[in-house]
Every structure is written in structure tokens, then in C-alpha cells.
Image: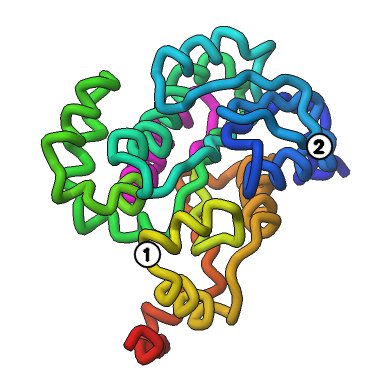
Amino acid sequence: MTNPFSYTGKRVLVTGAASGIGAELVTLLAELGAEHITALDIAEPSGKIDEFIRTDLSDPGAIDAAMEAIPGPIDALFNNAGVAATLPARTVLSVNYLAARRLGEGLSGRIRPGGSITQTGSITGNRWADHVEAIQELVAIDEWDEALAWVDAHPDLVADSYSFSKEVIQYFTMQASRASATKGIRTNSVCPAAVETPLLVDFKAVMTEKVIDWQAREANGRLCTATEVANALAFVGSDAATYINGLNLIVDGGFGAAMTTNQIDFSGLG
């Protein structure tokens, strides 16, 4: 029986592969037999990849040039790159949402039937329903600069630009999954809690160390690791998940379940 978790013979594209989750993911995909791994990042990865295309994912022109340079067809696209709210809101929305959308839409004609698009989201996007009308307005905008003009016009909404960008990604993943399915492509996201990566320093600067430590304690007593997120991404992008489409897979050690069932101790925030 063929191993449905295998990437043997598959051509894969990963953004944000230089560190953290992306670095773990390319290592895992190589171990799972990926035939060809292309990485798009602003910094060159040290992991096992076959093609590196230096790309500023906040620049639509750079993304378009990268897509032109990507060799061959694609079986799995992992929109993993992300930045924290320590950067300007325009940059955060560009990298965390607009780049993922542009790559998914721009490469959909080169993703082979049975392929997948998987975004790296976050549990900070779980409250997308609170802003659904605004998110629908933004997602309805196709043009990059017009979308950023919308961001500029909503400073209160994007004050926490990281969380809002991840809310948009969760909604967009669900919306895009319907159209991608008609092409034989699955679109999903994996949404972890705080992850032990180099970017954690930036998250602590914005969210505070107290909040992040409290969340970890109330989950299963520790932070999520980059390897655990990479494992979930590889699963969702693989043939083991062929009937999973439009899913925002929560990877939070049970924090959300405990919150929903009123088992969270909020005294740690006092």
C-alpha cells in the first residue's frame, strides 16, 4: 500500500524557509521524499532545498518575478512566511495575507490536480467572526495597492495587525477552498499557538511575556515547537488529507478546548 504521508515524487514550494517552522518543514519534506523543494524567502535557508529564490514577500513585483522563476509544476504550496506586529501594518498584511493570496492564485494553474495549498495561520486569528464584515470587504479587493489603501483607512482595526492578518487568512482559506476545489486543489491552514521560534521575541514584545507564558501553562504546560507545527503542515498538505479542504486546523495543546469548556485559570494574568 502506498504511504499517503509520503512526498515521494512531489514538487514543493515553501515560503519563509530560512528559520523556525519553515526550516523544520523543508527538513521534514526532504525526509518524506520530496522530489524538489523550492524556497522563497528574504534570507537564504540552510536546510536541504533544491532551489532558492530570494524574494521580498512584501513586494508584489518581487513575488511575480519569483513565480516566473519557479521551475516546473507544483504539488504542494506552503505559504508559511509571516512577520510580527513589530513591523508596520502594511508590511504585516502584505507578508501574512497578500503574499499568500498572490502566490496561491498566481500558481493555481501550475499546481497539479490533487495538489494542496496550506497556509501557516495562528490561533490569534480564531476571532475572525468578530470582524467578518470588514474582512469580507478586504478580501473582496483583488488589487494589492487598493488592499493596502484599505488597511491605511482602518487604523483601529489593524492596530493589532498580526492578529487581524491571521483572522483574514482563516477567512480567506475557507473562501478560497471552494474555488480551488474545482481545480482539484485543497486549500487549508494550520493555526498554532505561540511557537518556540526566533520570532517569539517579537511576539513577546507585542503580546507581553506574561500573556504568552500564561497561554502555554493553560494549554499543556509548554510552548508549541516548530517541529510540531511542521508535522501538522506536512500532514495537511499530503495525500493523507485528501478529503480535508477549507479547514483551519488548530494546534494549540488544548488551550481552545479548555477555553470553550470554561476550564481556563485567568488568575495567571492578574
* Residue 132 % position (x, y): 20, 49
According to the image, label 2 marks what residue?
A: 30
Per the image, the residue denoted by label 1 is: 207
Q: Residue furthest right?
A: 1
Q: Secondary structure at mark 2?
A: helix
Q: Quadrant of the C terminus?
A: bottom left
Residue 234 on image: x %, y %? 68, 45
Q: Which residues are magenta?
A: 166-187
Give the CA distance from mark 1 to mark 2. Answer: 34 Å
Residue type at the position of mark 1 = Met
Give the main secondary structure of the magenta stretch: helix
Per the image, label 1 sits on a secondary structure element best described as: helix
Q: Quadrant of residue 269?
A: bottom left
**Residue beneath the point at 77% across and 45% down:** 28
Q: Please name the residue shown 41% across and 60% down the image.
A: 205
Q: In the figure, is residue 212 to the left or right of 28?
A: left
Between residues 263 and 22, which one lies in front from this camera angle? Answer: 22
Q: Is residue 201 left or right of residue 163?
A: right
